[in-house]
Amino acid sequence: MALIFTDPPGEGGAAAKAAAPFTSPRSWSWLGLMPFLAFLVLFLIVPAVSVFSQALRGEDGAFGFASMGEAFSGQNLDAFWFSITFSAGAAAVGAVFGTLLAYVAVSVTRPRWLRNAVTAFSGVAANMGGLPLAFAFLSLLGRQGLGTKLLSGLGFDLYAGDFGLGEVTGLVTVYSYFNIPLMLLVILPAIDGLKPSWKEACSSLGGNGLTYWRRVGLPILAPSILGGFILLFANSFSAYATAAQLTDNSKIVPLRIGFFLGGDVSVGEDAVGYALAAWMIVIMAIAMIFYWALRRRAERWQS
Amino acid sequence: MRDRVFARLISPLILVVAAGFFLLPQFAMLRFALQNIQVIDLRWSNMFEKWSLAPLWSAFSDDQFGRALTLSLKLAVGTGLISLLLLVPTIVWVHLRLPRVRSTVEFMTILPYVIPAIGMVAGIMVIKPHARWFLDSDLSLIPFYVVLALPFTFRSIDSGLKALDLRTLVEASRSLGFGWTRTILHVIVPNLRTAILSCMFLTVAVVLGEYTIADVLLKRTFPAFMGEYRGSDPKGGYGLAILSLVVTTLIFMIIGLVSRPRSARRRRVKGAT
């Protein structure tokens, strides 16, 4: 399931800062956070640390990087490349079409309700994933799918090439269903932030529409678009449920982790499964750090 | 000039293509589940024939269905209540006493994004042999679902509290002699009705959509049942998927309507006059 957090971070931070704390700063008030922190540690941090503790343990039980190395070589490395490829592809498609659709939603003013309808639908579709999405695309683009039949009626054989719902092409198509709306929600505030006066300034200085986009519009949107791309990448890379119902392709890293956890491996090999999960957490952490940084950068123009 | 061409021709085209992309898969699933004609025999002439809800009824009558749905409902209620118990006092506290750590706390609530469900369940598998007394119970999923829902639930409560003049409310309540518990229960909670409602709805949506952890831990929740049932009766499985989709969509629509920021509502009123 996708997570949307589109409103800028620290919003209301100003208001919160304006109100001085009740008590002196050197108080015990941070103790009030203990239940929350303890809960997070117990049910999120402990599992995460356990993954690393298993991943960093060799077959003899001693500390070592053997499993981490194994999880990043051979077939496992192929799986990472496959997953990174389709996730990057899905993120690129989502970023381009999400931005385009957001621009359309902002610029088409005539039916007034259109923009609200588009954002409301995006809120639903961005959170769609898992089984229903997989089922929907299986019945549309599966070998016996409705869309496959319609296309063949038009003389186009979808399965003539290397198309498959578990391959890069198929996964990019299916994941676009939640990636495009997610991108739209992320980018909409940035597009709203483009002021008409900038366009006027550009044209009064002799620039045309193209100059405006090349020199003003896109540079201002760039951090938001890049941030959205990274969010979409992370979103696609970690998706398990949709992929699990679409295919049993073990080159998809989350499915591969699932197979290892399912216990269809010999003793000692399960450390590789945990190492795969550990690598995945590392990749997600890097992606989220970049996303967070880019989002802060993007806020500069949103007021 | 170019702008006008874009508005007149290209925008509608993009919107139509997008509508097709987003609606066709849903229609295909609906047809597969509810129309008793194989794709191969489908013609324009029999498009409207043999639609029936029978696959859904037979899915309902499977003896596992009731058990799975009950489990998921219990999980949803448990996840919602624990989320509220955990978040309302914490966020009230942060707003009143620790406003400076607010963005740090917010950052912590998106950690489930860094450690996705499949990573989390890998960790649970490590702990499992040491905590069977807890993890063998189906309801042990609740705390993990609370964590998974955090990015949503934190935001709903946090934005609800932002809209209140919390300090005045609390000062008034305290000076009238209420303790913290009664302040939260009788003063803050009634003012947070909308936020609490959307928090509960969001956890229902999260629990109805969560498949990864349940699948790996072999817990028979509703989504897990759906995936399994599809194996024996694809039409019924797809029918259940449609149903859960309808429920989730309704939930997000209700939240969208209820929790629209007040400023936006006011702007709309102003625009209408």
Image (cartoon, coloured by chain):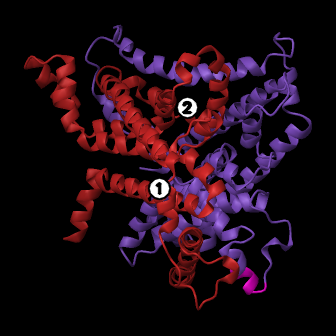
Apparent colour of chain B: red
Residue A164: in sight, yes or no? Answer: yes
**Label 2: chain letter:** B
The residue pinned by badge 1 equals B60
Residue at left offset 49%, top offset 43%? B68
Of the pair B50 and A36, the residue shown nearer to us: B50
Residue at left offset 31%, top offset 57%? B257
**Label 1: chain letter:** B
Q: In the picture, one chain is purple; tell me its letter.
A: A
Above or below, A206 against A14 in this view is: below
Magenta: main secondary structure equals helix
Q: Answer few, some or many: residues within 10 Å of disc 2's Cα (few below 14, many 20 plus, some between 14 and 19).
A: some
Above or below, B204 against B3 in this view is: above
Residue kind at label 1, given as amino acid type: Phe
Q: Which residue is situated farthest in the bottom direction here?
A: B45
Contact between marks 2 and 1 (CB within 8 A): the answer is no
The residue pinned by badge 2 equals B111
